[in-house]
Amino acid sequence: MIISVQNEHALSESIRILKSGGIVVFPTETVYGVGALSAKTNAVEKIYKIKNRNRSKPLLLHISKSESLELAQYVPPEAIELVKRFWPGPLSLILKASDRVPRNVIGNGDTIGFRMPNNPFFQKLADAVGPIVATSANKSGNPNPVSIKSAYEQLGNSVDLYVDGGEIKNGIASTILDLSKDRPTVLRIGAISVSEIESVIGKVER
């Protein structure tokens, strides 16, 4: 089902589907994401399958509150400064996962990524259901979707609900910064540049 973000039932229907173990495609400020609740193990596994995603690549926790960083073992000072500067926004932070994070979310590793999209619909959705395990709504290796049409063409009826927020003008995925090691390391350069990150926390590895 495809529903406009302007529809008065878009939020309640998204909440219902996620809580019942379904999968929802939703808009962010960068690209469309596809997500499920971490407690719904089968839904999380389904995301890996429909994307043909390698299990070595963990999914991201999309959050609406910085308090959700408590799911990490440790939040370094650099992360706190970056959160103040860039969240909500297109920066994903990789931290060591605590034992409260379900294993199916972190894949074969021991880290978890956090992202706080700057999108009003997403913020309301995550406020209602908590952190959403998500990634871009495309087949692995394919272009990131900036429209519902593009997301649907790739994922089809394997998704329970598509929330159409219109075409996303950015189209550049979030920058991913790994803070789980001794030196901050950029894993993917996206909407936020390396120089912007370094202006906050100093030199980073690439």
Image (cartoon, grey):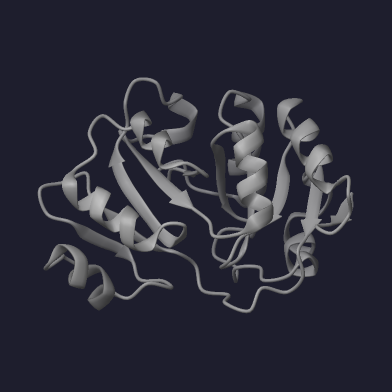
**In the current view of this chain or complex, which residue is farthest to the front?**
84
Q: State whether residue 96 is above or below residue 93.
A: above
Q: Image quadrant of residue 2?
A: bottom right
Q: For this rendering, which residue is in front, 155 or 22?
A: 22
Q: For this rendering, which residue is in front, 24 or 138?
A: 24
Quadrant including the C terminus: bottom left
Q: State whether residue 18 is above or below residue 113.
A: above
Q: Residue at x 71, y 51 (%)?
A: 25
Count the marks.
Answer: 0
Q: Residue at x 64, y 51 (%)?
A: 122
Q: State whether residue 96 is above or below residue 161.
A: above
Residue 107 visible in this rendered orientation of the protein: no
Q: Residue at x 66, y 45 (%)?
A: 124
> From the viewer's perspective, is 178 left or right of 38?
left
> From the viewer's perspective, is 23 left or right of 113?
right
Residue 159 in percent (x, y) is at 77, 45
Residue 47 in percent (x, y) is at 63, 42
Q: Residue at x 83, y 48 (%)?
A: 10
Q: For this rendering, which residue is in front, 74 or 181?
A: 74
> From the viewer's perspective, is 150 left or right of 126?
right
Residue 128 in percent (x, y) is at 66, 34
Residue 151 in percent (x, y) is at 73, 62
Residue 104 visible in this rendered orientation of the protein: yes
Q: Image quadrant of residue 86?
A: bottom left
